[in-house]
């Protein structure tokens, strides 16, 4: 297989991200929450794993050759991960992005030598994904050097989380696996792969998918979305109903509240989708006193969200305010558990 040795070496740099435990007071009772911190992964997000899975698949299928231009539609993190891989392998990479990409991700793509192609026309579902995919189709038709990784439909996406991320987590927890797992859904690759792994190896773990208002990833009504990384303008090709024990919809004000609480009280800097996942977890804990060891998949860190989820001006500009969960106040304290 072409690039085999390079890919093997890349794999040794991936994963083994830490799990940290915080305690958050929920309805007056301190509750432990475990956080799987994918911001510590190579390239700063869970998407390092996805990029590796997708690129390895292309190499195994003989589609990755010197001279190709790797192509992907991305909201940011996968683009940065693919750009790093492409640079490492010595192939080109073009990222089709939209205005929701953070300035930090866009700069990083440029630094890594990626060609950045931005669409600016919102799609009819309130996001940009469908516009990005239309641009990908145009590019594929225009030049046969393009090879599309296709994170939306390529089974290698959930597979890498079933075979790498899931077993890594189960190994970290040993004899006491989490009794509930919370993860954000965009393509649904991370969630679906973890769900398949946990259904097989830890069937008592409750699986909670976290989406955001306005996303149709799991069949919700379409609407405007402002946060990158969570939700999508198309239905997930990977998440099936039997993989979901509970479906949660977080909102941005709640995500902002928990991002800032965890930073202030525990010193852990979470990205926006991670704040949404923690918010969904807290809400679930309020309704389920029996859960003792929930795990939140925190897809990235907070560094690139200073001008969005950590900014009061930004929240105000999109008509949101920072709120603890409206249904079940008050939660106020977090600290290392
Ligand atoms: C910040 C963040 N959270 C969550 C996800 C969810 O990933 P998936 O596409 O596997 O559903 C992503 C994916 O880009 C992400 O960047």
Image (tube, grey):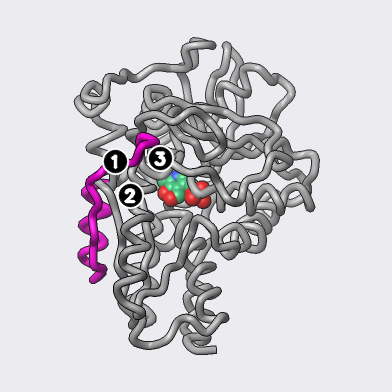
Of helix, strand and loop, which one carries label 2?
A: helix
Q: Residues within 10 Å of mark 3 (few under 14, many from 20)?
A: many
Q: Mark 3 points at which residue?
A: 270
Asked which secondary structure carries label 3, the reply is loop
Position of the C terminus by quadrant:
top right
Q: Count how many numbered circles sit on residues in the image.
A: 3
The residue carrying mark 1 has its beta carbon less than 8 Å from ligand 1: no
The numbered disc on residue 122 is 1
Residue, disc 2:
131
Horizontal side of 241 relative to 105 (left or right) equals right
Q: In this view, does 182 lie above or below 163?
A: above
Q: Position of residue 266 (x, y in %)?
A: 43, 34
Q: Nearer the viewer, residue 296 or 243?
A: 243
Q: Where is residue 329 in the image (x, y as percent from the top left)?
A: 50, 10
Q: Which of 315 and 286 is in front in this view?
A: 315
Task: Please tell me which residue is depicted at 43% across the width and 38% down the height of the picture.
Answer: 273
Q: Can residue 200 be seen in this view?
A: yes
User: Is residue 206 rendered to the left or right of residue 53?
Assistant: right
Q: What stretch is highlighted in magenta?
A: 102-127
């Amino acid at each position: 297989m072409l690039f085999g040795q390079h890919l093997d070496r890349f794999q040794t740099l991936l994963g083994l991200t830490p799990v940290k435990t915080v305690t958050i007071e929920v309805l007056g009772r301190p509750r432990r929450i475990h956080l799987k911190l994918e911001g510590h992964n190579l390239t700063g997000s869970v998407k390092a794993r996805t990029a590796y899975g997708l690129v390895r698949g292309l190499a195994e299928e003989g589609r990755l050759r010197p001279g190709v231009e790797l192509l992907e539609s991305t909201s940011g993190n996968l683009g940065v991960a693919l750009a790093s891989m492409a640079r490492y392998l010595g192939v080109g990479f073009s990222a089709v992005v939209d205005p929701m990409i953070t300035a930090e991700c866009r700069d990083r793509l440029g630094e890594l030598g990626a060609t950045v192609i931005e669409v600016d026309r919102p799609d009819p579902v309130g996001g940009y994904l469908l516009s990005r995919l239309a641009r990908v189709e145009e590019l594929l038709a225009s030049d046969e050097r393009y090879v599309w990784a296709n994170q939306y439909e390529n089974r290698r996406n959930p597979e890498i989380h079933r075979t790498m991320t899931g077993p890594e987590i189960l190994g970290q927890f040993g004899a006491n696996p989490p009794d509930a797992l919370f993860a954000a859904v965009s393509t649904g690759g991370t969630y679906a792969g973890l769900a398949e792994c946990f259904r097989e190896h830890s069937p008592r773990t409750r699986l909670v998918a976290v989406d955001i208002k306005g996303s149709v990833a799991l069949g919700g009504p379409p609407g405007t979305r402002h946060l990158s990384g969570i939700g999508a303008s198309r239905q997930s090709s990977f998440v099936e109903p039997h993989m979901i024990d509970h479906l949660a919809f977080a909102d941005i004000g709640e995500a902002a509240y928990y991002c800032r609480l965890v930073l202030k009280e525990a010193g852990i800097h979470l990205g926006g989708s991670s704040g949404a996942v923690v918010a969904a977890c807290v809400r679930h804990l309020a309704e389920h006193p029996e859960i003792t060891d929930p795990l939140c998949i925190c897809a990235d860190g907070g560094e690139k969200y200073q001008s969005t989820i950590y900014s009061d001006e930004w929240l105000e500009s999109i008509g949101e305010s920072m709120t603890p969960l409206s249904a079940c106040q008050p939660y106020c304290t977090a600290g290392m558990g």
